[in-house]
Image: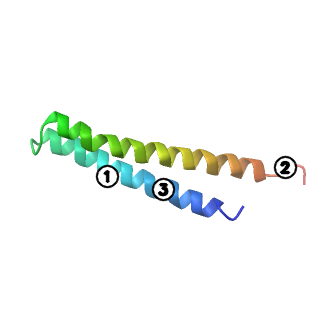
Amino acid sequence: MRYQPILAKVAFGGFLLGLAVALTASFGTRLGFWDYALGVKILVPGVAVGAFALGCSIAWIARALAANDSLG
């Protein structure tokens, strides 16, 4: 139960980091700062961070639902 706030913070931080990397990759490609291949190479780590954040958020919500005791 002590790791739940940490999971929430890691998930949110990972979401923000993945979003920033994805936006940088897409807008840099769109504005012509680099070519398409480099944009995809920049995008891949952003997607990986986003997937990690998704895993953390799923673990967080599963633990939150499991800790809810509706019998009392």
Q: Is residue 10 above or below residue 31?
A: below
The secondary structure type at the circle numbered 2 is loop
Q: Are marks 2 and 1 in contact (CB under 8 Å)?
A: no
Residue at image coords 76%, 48%:
66
Q: Residues within 10 Å of mark 1 (few under 14, many from 20)?
A: some
Sooner in the amino-acid sequence: mark 2 or mark 1: 1
Q: Are marks 3 and 1 in contact (CB under 8 Å)?
A: no
Sooner in the amino-acid sequence: mark 3 or mark 1: 3
Residue linked to disc 2: 70
Residue linked to disc 3: 12
CA distance for labels 2 and 3:
27 Å
Q: In the image, what residue type sits under mark 3?
A: Phe
Residue linked to disc 1: 20
Left or right: residue 25 versus residue 71 is: left
Q: In the image, what residue type sits under mark 2?
A: Ser
Q: In the image, what residue type sits under mark 1?
A: Ala
Q: Is residue 64 above or below residue 5?
A: above
The secondary structure type at the circle numbered 1 is helix
Sooner in the amino-acid sequence: mark 2 or mark 3: 3
Q: Considering the image in quadrants, where does the C terminus appear?
A: bottom right
Q: Is residue 49 above or below residue 30?
A: below
